[in-house]
Image (tube, helix red, strand yellow):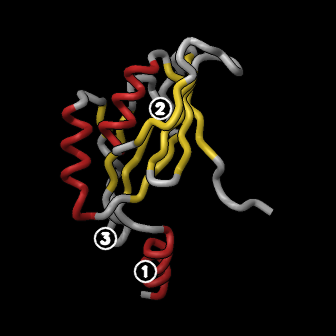
Amino acid sequence: MIEGISHITFIVKDLDKATTFFEESFGAKEVYSSGDKKFFISKEKFFLINDLWVAVMEGEEIEKSYNHIAFKIDESDYDMYLERIQNLGLEIESGRKRIEGEGNSIYFYDYDNHLFELHTVTLETRLLYYRKEQMD
C-alpha cells in the first residue's frame, strides 16, 4: 500500500543555483550535499520543505512543459511568496482564468525549466465548490 510521497527529484544544471532557489522560494533546509562525490548518477543535494524530501542532482536542462508540482500555501501568504519569486528574477507565468472557489495560484519556472505552482486551496475545498456549482 502506498503510504505517501517518499521524495521528489529534480535534475538541475547548477546545484548552487538550485540551493538558492529552494531555500529562498520555499524556505527549504539543506540536509545533505554529496560535495564532489557521485554516489549514483551525479553530485546531489537533499532538502526538506517542511517534511517533504526534495533531491536535486546535476544534469542536463529540460524543456519547459506544464508538468508541475503544486505546493499549498495560505491565501494570506500569497503576496509574500510572489515577492520572493520576483526577487529571484524567476519567470512567472500568468495563471489560467480562475472561477470563484478555485483559489489563487502562482505559476513559475525555476532556473532549470521546472514548473512550480503555489496554490491557496485544498482538493477538498475545490471539490466542495464544484459540487455546489453542479447543484445550482
Question: Label 1: few (<14), some or many (≥20) within 10 Å?
Answer: few
Instruction: Between label 1 and label 2, give the one nearer the viewer.
Output: 2
Q: CA distance from mark 1 to mark 2?
A: 33 Å
Q: Amino acid at mark 1?
A: Glu
Q: Amino acid at mark 3?
A: Glu
Place of residue 78 in the rendered image (x, y in percent of width and height, measured from the top left): 24, 55
The residue tagged 2 is: 114
Towards the viewer: 95 or 120: 120
Towards the viewer: 81 or 39: 39
Q: Earlier in the sequence, mark 3 or mark 2?
A: 3
Position above or below: 77 against 40: below
Identity of the residue drawn at 42% across and 87% down: 136
Identity of the residue drawn at 66% across and 58% down: 4
Q: Is residue 78 left or right of residue 52?
A: left
Question: Label 2: few (<14), some or many (≥20) within 10 Å?
Answer: many
Identity of the residue drawn at 54% across and 40% down: 54
Q: Amino acid at mark 2?
A: His
Q: Residue furthest bottom?
A: 135
Instruction: Between label 3 and label 2, give the one nearer the viewer.
Output: 2
Q: CA distance from mark 3 to mark 2?
A: 28 Å
Place of residue 110 in the rendered image (x, y in percent of width and height, measured from the top left): 39, 30
The residue tagged 3 is: 100
Identity of the residue drawn at 65% across and 15% down: 38
Quadrant where the N terminus is found in the figure:
bottom right
The residue tagged 1 is: 133
Q: Earlier in the sequence, mark 3 or mark 1?
A: 3
Place of residue 17 in the rendered image (x, y in percent of width and height, measured from the top left): 37, 22
Place of residue 26 in the rendered image (x, y in percent of width and height, measured from the top left): 36, 44
Position above or below: 113 against 23: above
Question: Label 3: few (<14), some or many (≥20) within 10 Å?
Answer: few
